[in-house]
Image: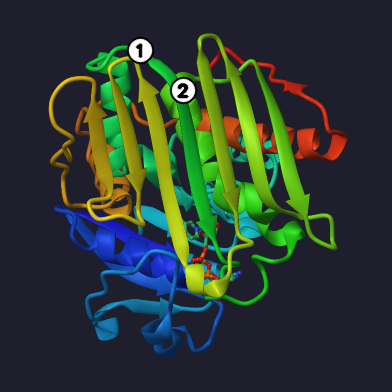
């Protein structure tokens, strides 16, 4: 039985809890959050994607407010780190040193340099580290990757990815503070950056344009990624009005089909083939959060499965966002140096 703890019981901590507790061979044994009222406060948590919440029996769980205290008292195999981003690196390194495997939320850390520290700690510990890039496990995005790779509708000619929201309002102001969240490009837009890297590998170069707020923090971005033979763009921002709530989506321009996905439509995804009727593919019901946790649980249980994400790839996504910020600030195209050893 894998003994799991969750560190940071806000929006994502509760999302991880709901997914971990449905996995076979897994027991969630403890929760830790610095907020002294987190048990009561968790009843009113909100996020950008509606949580499918089932009631939590807190009496069956160890409840902690300090990670060291939890480490001393609980026998654990794995911890989900669902803390604000500026805390990811230090707590991940501490957990790995304590002999735990770690599922750390995206973005991996505030800087690529911090990601390197985490990768080095994972290597030394011999424990597993996975970063929560849930789009790699999200049914519509999994389907799109299969369609592109199998060339069912010919080669991919162009693709655009979109992610828009109002400023996250479910937490205190750490999201708005670039020194703690990395700002919108690292917090929100990185989902699409990481998926593009997953789909096509590292681009040759990036050119980004952005809107900045009064603190010079980028609140809306449009990026073009240079790949041989493909026109790839992504747009993201958290400058939408609160009533807009959230939208993610993509358009794929294939040789023999167009595919449009948006969380705003029902059905969310439609395929417009060169021949035949418009259709919606049948997709599995579980969301990307559940699937990424199921994948990590199987990794920890020694079940063989195809590689979907490595810490180095998650680190490279942080690096790509750093380069996008540089492109916005300089107004120039930025070349991407690729580290071939992954
Ligand atoms: N994968 C996704 O789709 C997705 C969506 C939202 C957020 N995220 C990421 O998940 C992470 C957490 O975001 P969130 O929305 O859950 O934030 P949140 O503010 O809702 O939750 C963070 C929790 O950490 C607790 N905390 C802060 N410092 C602590 C400490 N030192 N020790 C213990 N607890 C502490 C806070 O009290 C809070 O309950 C961020 O990195 C964010 O970018 C990912």
In the image, what residue occupies the spot 46% across and 20% down?
200
Q: Is residue 9 left or right of residue 18?
A: right
Front position in the image: 324 or 250:
250
Q: Would you name the residue on which mark 2 appears?
A: 158
Q: Would you name the residue on which mark 1 appears?
A: 155
Front position in the image: 12 or 231:
231
Residue 40 location (% of width, % of height): 41, 90
Report the label total: 2
- Where, by quadrant of the figure, is residue 150 drawn? top left
Relative height, residue 143 to residue 153 (above, below): below
User: Distance from label 2 to label 1 (Cα)?
Assistant: 9 Å
Q: Is residue 203 left or right of residue 132?
A: right
Front position in the image: 37 or 234:
234
Residue 129 location (% of width, % of height): 45, 40
| Quarter the N terminus occupies | bottom left
In the image, what residue occupies the spot 84% across and 40% down?
329
- Give neighbour class at mark 1: few <14, some 14-19, many 20+ (Cα, 10 Å): some
- Give neighbour class at mark 2: few <14, some 14-19, many 20+ (Cα, 10 Å): some
Residue 139's disc is none
In the image, what residue occupies the spot 16% across and 37% down?
279
Cβ–Cβ under 8 Å for marks 2 and 1: no
Q: Is residue 339 left or right of residue 325?
A: left
| Label 1 within 8 A of ligand 1 by Cβ | no
Residue 323 location (% of width, % of height): 72, 32
Q: Secondary structure at mark 2?
A: strand
Relative height, residue 189 to residue 327 (above, below): below
| Label 2 within 8 A of ligand 1 by Cβ | no
In the image, what residue occupies the spot 54% across and 63% down?
83
Whether residue 169 is visible: yes
Whether residue 74 is visible: no
Residue 172 location (% of width, % of height): 62, 77
Q: Secondary structure at mark 1?
A: loop
């Amino acid at each position: 039985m894998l003994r799991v703890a969750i560190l940071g019981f806000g929006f994502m901590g509760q999302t991880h809890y709901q997914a971990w507790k449905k996995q076979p061979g897994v027991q969630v044994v403890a929760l830790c959050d610095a907020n002294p009222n987190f048990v009561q406060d968790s009843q009113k948590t909100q996020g950008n994607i509606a949580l499918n919440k089932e009631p939590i029996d807190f009496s069956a769980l160890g409840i902690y407010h300090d990670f060291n205290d939890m480490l001393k008292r609980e026998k654990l195999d794995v911890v989900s780190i669902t803390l604000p981003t500026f805390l990811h690196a230090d707590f991940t390194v501490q957990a790995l040193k304590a002999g735990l495997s770690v599922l750390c939320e995206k973005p991996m850390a505030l800087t690529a340099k911090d990601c390197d520290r985490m990768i080095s700690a994972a290597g030394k510990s011999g424990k597993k580290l996975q970063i929560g890039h849930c789009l790699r496990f999200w049914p519509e995005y999994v389907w799109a990757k299969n369609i592109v790779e199998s060339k069912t509708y010919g080669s991919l000619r162009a693709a655009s990815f979109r992610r828009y929201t109002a400023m996250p309002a479910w937490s205190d102001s750490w999201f708005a503070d670039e020194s703690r969240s990395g700002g919108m490009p690292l917090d929100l837009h990185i989902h699409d950056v990481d998926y593009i890297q997953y789909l096509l590998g590292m681009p040759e170069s990036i050119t980004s344009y952005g809107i900045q707020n009064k603190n010079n923090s980028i609140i809306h971005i449009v990026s073009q990624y240079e790949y041989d033979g493909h026109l790839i763009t992504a747009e993201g921002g958290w400058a939408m009005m609160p009533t807009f709530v959230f939208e993610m989506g993509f358009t794929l321009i294939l040789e023999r089909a167009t595919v449009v996905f948006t969380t705003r439509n029902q059905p969310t995804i439609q395929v417009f083939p060169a021949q035949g009727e418009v259709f919606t593919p049948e997709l599995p019901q579980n969301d990307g959060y559940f699937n990424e946790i199921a994948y990590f649980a199987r990794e920890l249980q020694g079940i063989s499965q195809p590689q979907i994400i490595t810490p180095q790839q998650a680190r490279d996504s942080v690096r790509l966002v750093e380069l996008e910020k540089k492109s916005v600030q300089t107004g120039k195209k930025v070349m991407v140096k690729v580290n071939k050893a992954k």
